[in-house]
Amino acid sequence: MRKIIYVLALASVMLAQATFAQQGCNTNTPGWGNNLGRVSFVSNQTWTIGNQTWSDAVTATACQKTAFNIGNPRTGNYSADCRSNPEHRGDLFSWCAVTCFANQLCPYPWRVPTRDDFIALDQALGGSGKNRCCFVQFVTDNYINRWGGVFGGISNPGGSFSSQGLWGVYWSLSERNIYFGYILKFDTVGNANPQLSWRKYLGLALRCVRTITP
């Protein structure tokens, strides 16, 4: 039986440019990886849900302490927000940043989770795996207390934070189309959305995953 382990390790790796063939991400912008600098996992906190153990967020330890956005503003190529965001316990990245630099942000044997991983998480928490509304107690008991999620909000391309204390939002590697990537979102009004999609230019949190066979 395959066992999915989302474990956080204290490590850091140097970022380098990576070849990326998905839609909507232009990799011909020199120097972006240098701006982001080194990356590391924020802490050694983990949360075990069924056969899954999830990690805390990822941070860019040497990047500019500001929001920056390089590339097509509609798709948000290579944007990151490296300012302190304690509510998320890590930095916020655009979908293009997460996917283009997936191997550096989540170095082997780690990987960026997919939409299917978020669906499996929701089901392990007792949910349906589908997007649904108005289950405040479910979100509090499961996504916050059991999974360790936080209502950290998002970062906008203009440099502002929004919805801190209201939304918890995390990128997956999965893509809906050239403008949208799949996310996990839960909020204070009880929305539980393991397969929602949002604009790629938004800055969201990231957790890494590895799969092992016992």
Image (cartoon, rainbow, N blue to C red):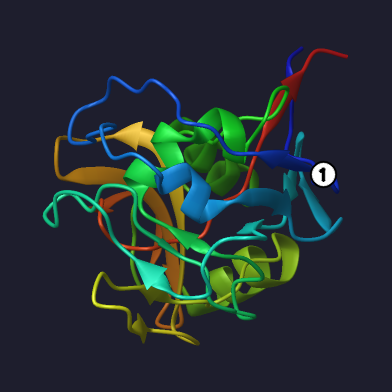
Residues 196 and 108: in front is 108
Q: Is residue 110 shown left or right of residue 134?
A: right
Say if 142 sits above or below 83 in the image: above
Which residue is drawn at the image coordinates 82% and 44% (left, top)? Answer: 11
Q: Is residue 3 placed above or below 105 in the rendered structure?
A: above
Task: Tell me the SS state at disc 1.
Answer: loop
- Figure label count: 1
- Give the percent coordinates (x, y) of residue 5: 76, 33
Location of residue 88 in the rendering, given as x and y in whole percent from the top left corner: 59, 72
Which part of the image, by quadrant, shows the N terminus? top right
Determine crowd level at label 1: few under 14, some 14-19, many 20+ residues with C-alpha closer than 10 A.
few
Quadrant of image for the C terminus? top right
Residue appearing at x 71%, y 65% in the figure: 148
| Position of residue 105 measured from the top left corner of the image (x, y, whole percent) | 59, 40
Residue farthest along the bottom direction in this orientation: 165
User: Of residues 199 and 21, which is closer to you in this image?
Assistant: 21
The residue indicated by pointer 1 is 11
Q: Residue at x 64, y 41 (%)?
A: 208
Residue 128 appears at what percent x and percent y?
46, 46
Of 203 and 72, which appears nearest the observer?
Answer: 72
Q: Find residue 182 and report its image quarter.
A: top left
* Any part of residue 195 in sight: no
Q: Amino acid at mark 1?
A: Ala
Which quadrant would residue 145 be assigned to in this image?
Answer: bottom right
Q: Is residue 117 visible?
A: yes
Which residue is found at the position 29% from the left and 32% from the top?
Answer: 27
Residue 214 horizontal side relative to residue 28, left or right:
right
**Relative vertical location of residue 160 with respect to residue 119 in this rendering, above or below:** below
